[in-house]
Image (cartoon, coloured by chain):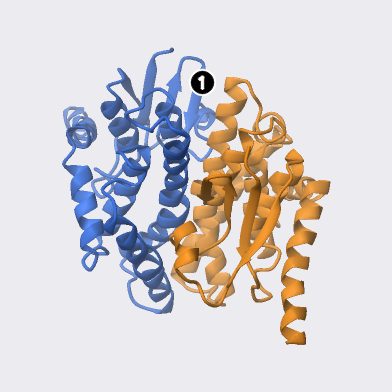
Chain colours: A blue, B orange
């Protein structure tokens, strides 16, 4: 097994701190107890080296020996193969983990990211915001409320699917989208209470705060 | 191995025909040469049986013996384990396939679906459309143009990642989003020229057309 190296930005502005997607990877690595190292890539000048690892010039990416992997979903499935703390080993648990990984990213986050962009841009009136607000609240959060009424974690036991779904719902919660969804809210709190989430979150905040201090000293 | 049964709607209105996500599953099954059967679930009345298989009351889902799987991405990764026509077997090819599956669904489609909703709703002026138009054209299509300048298929040879990325780009093309992206356009045409795509597309169109005839005869 190669050394695991997680790369994220050297710095980001305040608003995305605590929500940059390297958090998902840190959280999974902490849950699995896998040793890793964090490296930085410039936020402001994204060059060919960055594009070679991440074609959309985003973060994170993970290197594992010769492999370089981008997309938080792909990285988490890669790590899930290394530890059963991240994915059950029976065929049903494995299949449920993978389907909920996609449900988090391709059904729930596909609704919540555009919705959050309207919020970030202060454009929360008008017909199109109304469309996305209905999409998030009625077609996603309300359905997850039913799902989470019956279980603590999506695939039987805690898995990478929960890391992703909690993280997606956390952004919805940031803009008050869970106020009528007590089961989703409790699920997010359950995720955030895990020591590995707390360490991942604190480490991301410290990483970007360190960059502020460097800039100040320069 | 259990019998493979793909479930889609019994009927959909004209606009989504040819783009319903069961097409991705049909295409993969045809590429792999796996035998399968297609069943229908009501489009208009979505009951508990539907929710039990697909918690967001969408389609498709696939059953494989005792397993029932939703999310086109999860279904395609499940099928990819059955046939190397859908995913290379070496660790690098496998890893690249999975990362490009997520790049199609969580990076590209996350931009293109909201953008296409603005188009479907005829709301293609204003600041928010401008944001998503830039997101699709400059942060996604332009980047894919660079990627596709160097390769015919995303993971070395044709894989489920191409089924998903071609399908995502096909929707962008529907609303003229590839007009300045000849490499993406050629990639979509390469995908659509495959006999398995043609059969999957024709079968989906025939499936919904049959429902029209039934309704007419009733």
Task: Residue at 77%, 86% (x, y): give it.
Answer: B217
Q: Is residue B139 visible?
A: no
Q: Position of residue B128 (x, y in %)?
A: 44, 67
The foreground one among A38 and A173 is A173
Q: Is residue A92 above or below residue B40?
A: above
- Which residue is labeled 1 in the image? A67
Percent of width and height locating residue B59? 56, 61
Q: Position of residue A174 (x, y in %)?
A: 24, 57
Residue A35 left/right relative to A82 = left
Question: Which of the two residues, A88 or A51, is positioned nearer the viewer here?
Answer: A88
What is the chain identity of the residue bearing mark 1? A
Residue for point 68% across, 33% down: B83
* Image quadrant in which the N terminus of chain A is located: top left
The correct choice, above or below, for A172 with respect to B126 in the image is above
- Tell me the quarter of the image containing the C terminus of chain A: top left
Decide: is A150 above or below A196: below
In the image, taking residue A176 as reference, residue A62 lies left or right, namely right
Res A23 → quadrant = top left
The answer to whether residue B96 is left or right of residue B166 is: left
Q: Residue at x 20, y 62 (%)?
A: A182
Please tell me in which quadrant of the rendered image residue B155 appears: top right
Question: Which residue corresponds to the image point at 31% horizontal and 64% vertical from the top-left?
Answer: A119
Q: Residue B34 at x, y = what percent?
A: 73, 42
Q: Secondary structure at mark 1?
A: strand
């Amino acid at each position: 097994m190669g050394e695991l190296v997680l790369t994220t930005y050297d710095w980001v502005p305040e608003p995305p701190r605590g929500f940059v997607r390297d958090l998902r990877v840190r959280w999974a690595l902490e849950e699995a107890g896998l040793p890793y190292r964090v490296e930085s890539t410039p936020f402001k000048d994204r060059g060919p080296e960055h594009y070679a690892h991440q074609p959309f010039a985003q973060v994170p990416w993970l290197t594992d020996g010769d492999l370089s992997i981008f997309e938080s979903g792909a990285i988490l499935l890669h790590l899930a193969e290394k530890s059963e703390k991240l994915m059950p080993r029976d065929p049903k648990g494995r299949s449920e983990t993978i389907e909920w990984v996609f449900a988090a990213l391709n059904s729930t986050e596909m609704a919540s990211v555009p919705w959050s962009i309207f919020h970030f841009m202060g454009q929360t009136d008008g017909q199109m915001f109304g469309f996305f607000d209905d999409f998030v609240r009625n077609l996603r959060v309300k359905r997850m409320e039913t799902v989470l009424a019956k279980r603590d974690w999506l695939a039987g036991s805690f898995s990478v699917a929960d890391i992703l779904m909690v993280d997606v719902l956390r952004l919805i919660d940031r803009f008050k989208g869970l106020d009528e969804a007590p089961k989703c809210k409790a699920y997010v709190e359950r995720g955030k209470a895990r020591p590995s989430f707390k360490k991942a979150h604190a480490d991301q905040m410290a990483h970007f705060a360190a960059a502020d201090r460097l800039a100040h000293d320069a």
